[in-house]
Image: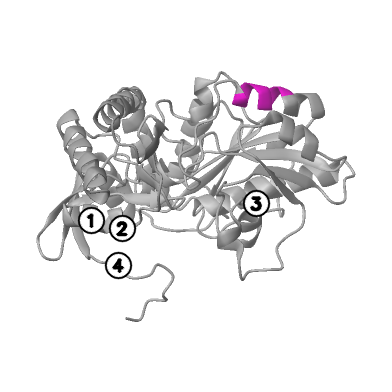
Amino acid sequence: MSLMNTYGERAITLTKGDGAYVWDDQGRRYLDGLSGIAVCGLGHCHHAVSQAINEQANALVHVSNLYLVKPQVELAQRLVDVAGMDCVFFSNSGAEANEAAIKIARKYGNDKGISAPHIITAHSSFHGRTMATLTATGNDKIKAGFTPLIDGFSHVPFDDIAAIKAAATANTVAVMMEPIQGEGGVHVPHDNYLTSLRALCDENNWLLILDEIQTGNGRTGSYFAYQQRGILPDVVTTAKGLANGMPLGACLARGIASTVLQPGHHGSTFGGNPVACAAACATVNTILTEDLCHKAGELGRYFIARFRDALSNNPHVVDIRGQGLMLGIELDTPCADIVTKAMQQQLLLNVTAGNTIRLLPPLILNKAQADDIITLVVQLIHDFYA
């Protein structure tokens, strides 16, 4: 195969999708409990998104960011309205959105006379695979072989305000956190964590950067996860579910953070592409008008209650946690083989942090499909230890 071997062996070849299902080249249908790793929140081939893509592709595909295009302007306004932010920079991916956030923090520090700005992030975090976001990520395993990394980051335990205080220096300019850790094992912090983090950043004139690449776009029960805590970050990044499969990231900022990048400081050839932005406009509209945030919250609580009931007597289940349709079942041993076993049962899921089954089903999932996932996952876990 001519593809670079960055993903290992891939057992199936998918050819089409519809709603919560995908089909392989042998005609087998799979229930998608992963939705492209939290990307296809509206499911596959959603009619509003497909229509928006087709119409825009027949009108204008690309002109560069030297000119305004209507879908980008419309999407920017919708996002700043829903997020409570002032402005947005569009990129192609979540990693690039986080790169923009890091550049905002560094420029903010330099503007204050700090020559070596310092950003605090968390152990077990994941912010991307570019050199800066790889350094920000709190996972040594994925950094191995890519040294030297970039200076200016330190890592502390997640959900630990005291640890952030202890790690701070005179050069600290920002704290960068995921509201819920996804790749790290679906870890949900205490209810007061984000509010305490906001207060700490205010007290020290640090920027609060929230990485909502995975938690945003309705995934956790509100459009952004921070909205359930009644706070506003200075910078929030998102991607994944933003355009329901089209490549698009966004870095939103408010207040002082919205003014530090000026012409010439940052850019992207493809960021805010008209087709991707048209898809995102349709996606955001659908999430909001169909109240899919609320639905995700309700269905997530149903998942957790059912899993806890069905797995309460299994001694190998360490924890069942999550928020909205971002769910994790931690087992007491590595369980990567469950991915293959689930695929054999025509269910797509993945394992993160080595021993946590992660489910990220589409927001349009119905209760019957949720029951199918629950039944299959429970049986997979019981069989795994049989």
Where's residue 165, x and y in %? 77, 32
Residue stretch rendered in magenta on the structure: 193-199
Question: Of circles 2 and 4, which is in front?
Answer: 2
Q: Secondary structure at mark 3?
A: helix
Vertical position of residue 181 compared to residue 93: above or below:
above
Q: Residues within 10 Å of mark 4 (few under 14, many from 20)?
A: few
In terms of sequence position, does the residue under pointer 3 or pointer 4 come before the other?
A: 4
Please, which colouring scheme is shown?
one colour
Q: x, y (%) of residue 282?
A: 33, 38
**Where does the N terminus fall, quadrant-wise?**
bottom left
From the image, tell me which residue sits under label 1. 341
In depth, the one of 42 and 87 nearer the eye is 42
The residue depicted at 78 percent of the width and 46 percent of the height is 118
- Depth check, mark 3 against mark 1: the one in front is 1
Mark 3 to mark 4 CA distance (whole Å): 29 Å
Is 338 inside the magenta-drawn segment?
A: no
Q: Looking at the image, which is closer to me, 337 or 5?
A: 337
Amino acid type shown at disc 2: Asp
Residue type at numbered disc 1: Lys
Give the Cα distance between marks 3 and 1. 33 Å
- Helix, strand or loop at disc 2? helix
Check disc 2 and report the residue beneath it.
337
Measured in 3D between alpha carbons, the distance from the residue under mark 1 to the one under mark 2, in whole angstroms, is 6 Å
Q: Is residue 193 above or below residue 56?
A: above
Instruction: Name the residue at 54% across, 29% down.
Output: 189
Residue 10 is marked as 4
**First-in-chain label (3 vs 1):** 3
Main SS category, magenta section: helix
Q: Are marks 3 and 2 in contact (CB under 8 Å)?
A: no
Q: Separation of disc 3 and disc 2 at Cα?
A: 29 Å
CB under 8 Å between callouts 1 and 2? yes
- Numbered mark located on residue 136 in the image: 3
